[in-house]
Amino acid sequence: MDAELGGKKGECAQREMCYLAHHRSFEKFGLQRALMDVDYEFQPAFTLMTANLGSGESIKVEPGAMVAQSSGLNVETGRASKGGLIGGLIKSAMGGESFFINTYTAGSSGGWISMAPSSPGDICTFDLEPGQNMYMQGGAFMACSSNIQYDTKFQGAKALFSREGAFFLRAFSEGGPGQVFYCSYGAIKEVEVTPDAPIIVDNGHLVAFTDGVSYEPQKAGSWKTTIFGGEGVVLKLSGSGKAWIQTRNLAALASRLMPFMPKPSN
């Protein structure tokens, strides 16, 4: 019992320290904007996030992520990213995100909206400061505060060797600090990347990374290991920043299930 209570107290203290750190980072820019009020339940396997919106407050949500909401919210559907229509459609298809985004806005009495990713896993928050970028793999974005914009970054020749898709999603803030809510398949682990300590990540487990982190596809080992060892091509993350990895690989699960899928009859 004492150990359980101690664990709960430690968890509460950690959340409070995290909140204060985020709040101070906002105050550093001389802005009074408060963090969005969110609650998390059922972490980390089946996380449900609820955003509690004040009067007139808005949140952008990926189509299909809404689970439930209060009756006083207004929803509008618009273009997810700026740019031309054809280019936006191509980038959305290649980047793994929807071409549209739903913006939920609370009325005078406020409201709430609960969200969840399409696959079992966790949801985390990243606080974006002005001039900062966050890069996510396709499917990782779930929601963001109203002042966050995002577009896609082409991987170039790296896409030929990476299973992350041809584009990464780039989120950035306009008009002050904001928040990005991103999701994973499985739990999320934060990893520090430094010039003296680059890391190797299976390319099916990378979720997101910050400015200052660069990546290069490379062999998992010898050609024998790369072909027969089950790892294939991995990503070497170097530079200085943070990266987030997921504990499960959706593509690996799909390949495991393929032999059990019904085969078309002749």
Image (spheres, rainbow, N blue to C red):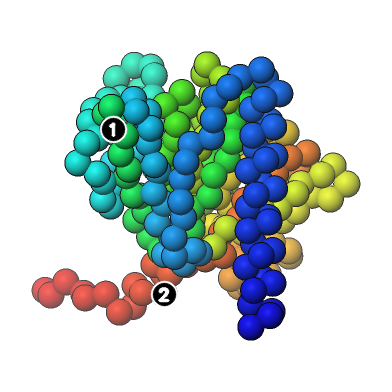
Mark 2 vs 1, N-terminal side? 1
Using the image, determine if residue 173 lies above or below residue 45.
Answer: above
* Quadrant of image for the C terminus: bottom left
Determine the secondary structure under disc 1. loop
- Residue at horizontal 67 percent and vertical 25 percent from the top: 27
Q: Residue 68 appears at what percent x and percent y?
A: 26, 50
Give how far across and how far down residue 44 sits, in percent.
Answer: 50, 64
Compared to residue 158, the image places residue 16 above or below, namely below
Q: Secondary structure at mark 2?
A: helix
Amino acid, disc 1: Ser
From the image, tell me which residue sits under label 2.
256
Q: Residues within 10 Å of mark 1 (few under 14, many from 20)?
A: few
Q: Which mark is residue 109?
A: 1
Most foreground residue, 155 or 39: 39
- Looking at this view, name the residue that lies furthest to the left: 266
Residue 210: % across, % down: 65, 37
Q: Is residue 105 left or right of residue 246?
A: left
Q: Position of residue 246 (x, y in %)?
A: 56, 59
The amino acid sitting under disc 2 is Arg
The numbered dot on residue 80 is: none
- Residue visible at 41% across and 74% down in the picture: 256
Q: On the rendered image, what quadrant is the N terminus found in?
A: bottom right
Which residue is found at the position 21% from the left and 74% from the top?
Answer: 263
